[in-house]
């Protein structure tokens, strides 16, 4: 899926006490996002079946946020995102309730939204090395 089909927004804004959220809007062909999130004819992938990761890009203040199918490793989509916003989301999630939880809200081209509650966000440098201190990794998870 093309990256330019997506817009991304990070919440909360400074001073907002809401749950940290990555809001992603898909503006591509109708049904495109839902098709990639569909596991069977009746069911979409649930939160436990999706992984969220962020990869820094060399010589840039941006990176790439990706959503993948945990079982197959297949990319559902990638979207450009500012490093500063991802760092702020990680900090907000750690402060919110101590569990590091956040939401990913996906809105398709028909205006329908899916919300995924997540507690893991892996952040990688441009060489692909995990940045543990800039990631959200619950204590119960062994990598």
Image (spheres, rainbow, N blue to C red):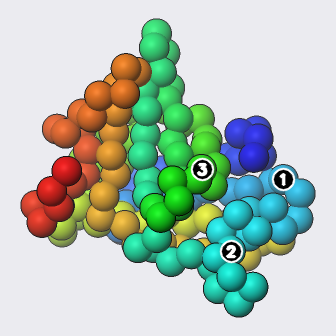
For residue 75, the mark is 3
- When the figure is inspected, residue 57 is found, relative to residue 37, above or below; the finding is above
- Looking at the rendered structure, the secondary structure element under dot 1 is loop
- When the figure is inspected, residue 130 is found, relative to residue 126, above or below; the finding is below
Point out residue 100 in the picture as x, y percentages from the top left corner. Answer: 23, 61
Q: Earlier in the sequence, mark 2 or mark 3?
A: 2
- Looking at the rendered structure, the secondary structure element under dot 3 is strand
Mark 1 to mark 3 CA distance (whole Å): 16 Å
Point out residue 19 in the picture as x, y percentages from the top left corner. Answer: 35, 67
Mark 2 to mark 3 CA distance (whole Å): 13 Å
Q: Which residue is mark 1?
A: 28
Q: Residues within 10 Å of mark 3 (few under 14, many from 20)?
A: some
Residue at image location 30% in from the left, 64% down from the top = 119
Mark 1 to mark 2 CA distance (whole Å): 16 Å
Identity of the residue furthest to the left in this view = 139
Q: Which residue is mark 2?
A: 38
Residue at image location 76% in from the left, 68% down from the top = 35
Do we see residue 108 in this rendering? no
Do we see residue 125 in this rendering? yes
17 with respect to 11 (left or right): left
85 with respect to 135 (left or right): right
């Amino acid at each position: 899926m093309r990256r330019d089909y997506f817009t991304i927004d990070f919440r909360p804004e400074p001073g907002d006490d809401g749950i940290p959220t990555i809001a992603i809007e898909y503006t591509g062909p109708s049904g495109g996002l839902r098709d990639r999130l569909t596991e069977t004819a009746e069911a979409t992938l649930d939160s436990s079946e999706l992984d969220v990761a962020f990869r820094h890009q060399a010589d840039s203040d941006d990176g790439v946020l990706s959503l993948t199918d945990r079982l197959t490793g297949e990319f559902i989509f990638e979207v450009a995102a500012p490093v500063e916003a991802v760092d702020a989301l990680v900090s907000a999630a750690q402060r919110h309730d101590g569990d590091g939880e956040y939401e990913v809200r996906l809105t398709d081209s028909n205006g329908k939204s899916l919300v995924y509650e997540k507690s893991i966000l892996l952040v990688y440098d441009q060489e692909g090395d995990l940045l543990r201190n800039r990631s959200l990794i619950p204590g119960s998870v062994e990598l």
